[in-house]
Image (tube, rainbow, N blue to C red):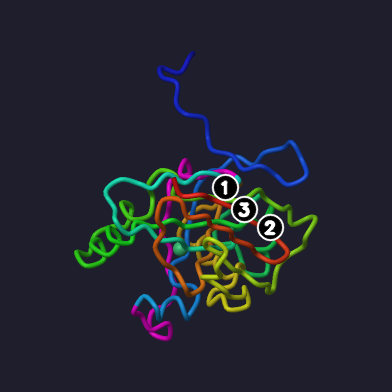
Amino acid sequence: MADVITAPAPARLPVVGSDDTFPIHRIYCVGRNYADHAREMGHDPDRDPPFFFQKNPDTIVADGGEFPYPDKSEDVHFELELVVALGRGGKDIPEDQALDCIYGYAVGLDMTRRDLQGEAKKMGRPWEVGKAFEFSAPCSALKPAAEIGHLDGGRIWLEVNGEVRQDGDLNQLIWSVQESIAYLSGLFTLAPGDLIYTGTPAGVGPVVRGDRLYGRVEGVGEIRITVT
Ligand code: MN
């Protein structure tokens, strides 16, 4: 038996210090997972808990590089995020077993067509046009948890053209990594290869062509992209 078409190969992330790669299954993203960011978007984090949406797995820009400014938008924003990569999946994973599912960590950008997302919010429509477009998920190489352990905190910050624009700490996450995995696994069957973008701290803003973005998470790594 043969396939009747040739579909694109799954996207992969490099693993730091190795020739091995991590194939990507799904990309989940947490919305409004830092209180200051929820407030800057006009929401009350005490009333509206975080929630999830997805990006398509082939939107990854592996290890940074060029981010082509997408069509149909005049207001594309950066959102710097800690990314969790699952080596194991499951359903209804208890919080105290969630960390065992993690293969590693990375630094990602949840690039967003904010104008299209805003229209979708207003009309009560889904967010894919704002969130799940090609190249919308630049992500650094993965650092295995076996090497760096797990993270209780650590600075997360983004510079645009050398100027700090986002600056937070992982200890500000409303839903911890464990809580996000446990909650998500009640809604979906998680699988090896899943990525979770864990949400962005305050300071999001627009990019223009030529901008150089440099994001870092202490203890995890860094990502660089140029908007083209
Ligand atoms: Mn985000």
Would residue 178 be counted in the magenta stretch? no
Crowding at label 2, few (<14), some or many (≥20) Cα neighbours within 10 Å? some
Crowding at label 1, few (<14), some or many (≥20) Cα neighbours within 10 Å? many
* Residue 196 relative to residue 44: left or right: right
The answer to whether residue 186 is above or below residue 133 is: below
Q: CA distance from mark 1 to mark 3?
A: 17 Å
Q: Which residues are magenta?
A: 42-62
**Mark 3: secondary structure:** strand
The answer to whether residue 126 is above or below residue 34 is: above
Residue at the farthest bottom position: 46
Query: Residue 70's spot in the image, x, y percent?
Result: 35, 46
Res. 159 image quadrant: bottom right
Query: Residue 47's spot in the image, x, y percent?
Result: 38, 84
Question: Which residue does the image show at 40% across and 55% down from the upper left?
Answer: 208
Residue type of the residue flagged with mark 1: Gly
Dot 2 or dot 3: first in sequence order is: 3
Q: CA distance from mark 2 to mark 1?
A: 12 Å
The answer to whether residue 215 is above or below residue 153 is: above
Q: Which mark is residue 64?
A: 1
Mark 1 CB lies closer than 8 A to ligand 1 = no
Q: In terms of depth relative to the viewer, which is nearer, 109 or 98?
A: 109
Question: Which residue does the image show at 78% across and 60% down from the upper left?
Answer: 148
* Residue 160 relative to residue 169: left or right: left
Res. 172 image quadrant: bottom right
Front: mark 2 or 3: 2
Query: Residue 123's spot in the image, x, y percent?
Result: 19, 64
Question: Which residue does the image show at 57% across and 43% down from the upper left?
Answer: 62
Q: Which residue is mark 3?
A: 85
Query: Residue 35's spot in the image, x, y percent?
Result: 48, 80
Front: mark 1 or 3: 1
Q: Which residue is mark 2?
A: 221
Q: CA distance from mark 2 to mark 3?
A: 14 Å
